[in-house]
Image (cartoon, rainbow, N blue to C red):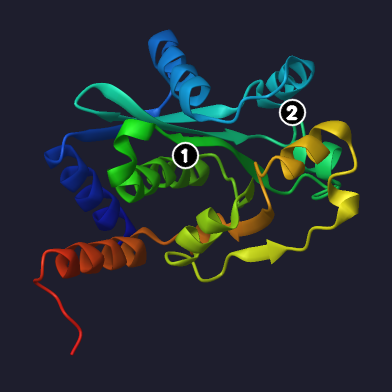
Amino acid sequence: MNSAAIGFFSMYAKMKGYRFSVVNTEAENADSDKIFNEGGYKLPESFRQEMEVYKTDAIKFIAYYKNKAVGTVGLADPGIRNRPYELHGIDQNGEHFEIQSLVVSKEHRECTQLVLLGLFKEMYAWSLRNSVKSWISFGLRQLYITMRRYNKNICLVGLNENNYRLPLAHYLYENNVFDTCSIMKVEDFTPSRICAKFLKKRLKKIGLFNNR
């Protein structure tokens, strides 16, 4: 069922003009960086180099609409650099791959949900192929609420002053780059259920499915 759901979503997205993939080429990497630089958070120069170190060797994913890049996200291996623990004191054992730099281009925000689900579909498939069991994410609560619609088992991690006492972490929190930390198992991001919920929402939007 999950394979069928992934295939159906990919076909639906293609019909709408979208495609999603792992970043493999220099051109795709440049597109990913451009999207983030245009729509992501802007760090002071004093923190920029430090943040780039944490993003080194992250696996990137990208979304295109009619060959124009419209979204990107990264997945960082804690075995290479464990930013959640080094910055926030969370995940000391490095069990969770960190979701990083999730951005949808500003001019494409009306289709944010489709782009997000396409990017997560790629992360899901890549994670299964590479035996990644769980993800960790720092972001705004609205993103957590959005993802919880598709994965009821997302677990919130409590944050306090000990989680952002280092200068970079403190800056990210104080400037509203994140206010929530969540952990989810990859296996709970079930494509068949997500595809069903996505289609139900689309049908309701066009008036073909209404709850009585």
The disc labelled 1 sits on which kind of residue? Trp
Q: Looking at the image, which residue sits at the far front?
A: 175
Element under label 2? loop
Residue ID for mark 2: 80
Instruction: Tell me what residue is drawn at x 65 percent, y 41 percent.
Output: 177
Q: Quadrant of residue 4?
A: bottom left
Name the N-terminal-most of marks 2 and 1: 2
Instruction: Tell me what residue is drawn at x 44 percent, y 23 percent.
Output: 35
Left or right: 144 in relation to 122: right
Residue 199: image location, x then y, percent = 22, 63
The disc labelled 2 sits on which kind of residue? Ile
Examine the rendered structure and indicate whether residue 47 appears above or below residue 179.
Answer: above
Q: Looking at the image, which residue sits at the far left?
A: 208
Residue 143: image location, x then y, percent = 52, 54
Residue ID for mark 1: 126
Quadrant where the C terminus sits is bottom left
Disc 1 crowd, CA 10 A, few/some/many (<14, 14-19, 20+)? some
Left or right: 111 in relation to 168: left
Alpha carbon separation for disc pair 2 and 1: 17 Å
Instruction: Tell me what residue is drawn at x 29 percent, y 60 percent.
Output: 195
Residue 129: image location, x then y, percent = 48, 41
Instruction: Tell me what residue is drawn at x 84 percent, y 45 percent.
Output: 164
For the residue pair 20 and 95, the one nearer the viewer reads as: 20
